[in-house]
Amino acid sequence: MPELYKSAIGSLVRWALATVFGYLVAHGALTEGQATELAVTIGTGAAALLWGLWQKYRSKLKFFTALELPANATQATVRDVIANTPASENVSKAFQGTGA
């Protein structure tokens, strides 16, 4: 995933959390300490979840790409094929186990 997308998603999530927690603190539903603790907990959980999903996607993509290559293909070859394949084909391959 390009760095720009990662930064944009991170910014949107931080903005949403700040808005929601700011509203809840302003209306007395949470104290500042509770809001901070909840934000850290949600952020940590979301980061762990997203990291796990990303790793599973990458491993499936490498596996299915390697299956399409000759038996003597190296890991470097698999990486090169993935890097030179359009993203839409890579997503299809990882989720369906086939090329586009």
Image: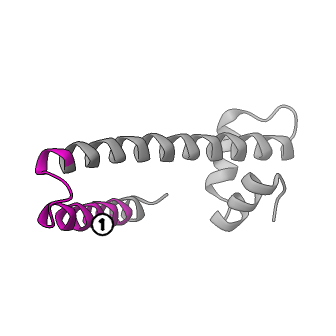
> Looking at the image, is 79 positioned above or below residue 1?
above
Q: Would you say residue 27 sits in the magenta stretch?
A: yes
Badge 1 crowding class, 10 Å Cα cut-off, few under 14, some 14 to 19, many 20 or more, is few
Of all residues shown, which one is farthest toward the front?
28
* Depth order, front residue of 38/56: 38
Q: Is residue 55 above or below residue 21?
A: above
Residue at disc 1, secondary structure: helix
Q: Is residue 78 above or below residue 6?
A: above
| Residue at the spot 37% in from the left edge and 64% down from the top edge | 4
Q: Position of residue 96 (x, y in %)?
A: 81, 56
Q: Quadrant of residue 59?
A: top right
* Relative horizontal placement of residue 66, taking residue 81 as reference (left or right): right
User: Where is mark 1, residue-wise?
Assistant: 16
What residue lies at 21% left-to-right and 59% top-to-bottom?
29
Question: Could you tell me residue 88's position as x and y percent?
Answer: 68, 67
Look at the image and say whether residue 28 sits in the magenta stretch.
yes
Residue at left offset 85%, top offset 47%: 68
**Quadrant of residue 73 in the image?**
top right
State the predominant SS element of the stretch in magenta: helix
Magenta span: 8-34
Residue type marked 1: Ala
Q: Residue at x 84, y 56 (%)?
A: 98
Closer to us: 70 or 94: 94
Could you tell me residue 67's position as x and y percent?
Answer: 84, 41
Residue 66's spot in the image, x, y percent? Answer: 78, 41
Placement of the C terminus among the 4 image quadrants = bottom right
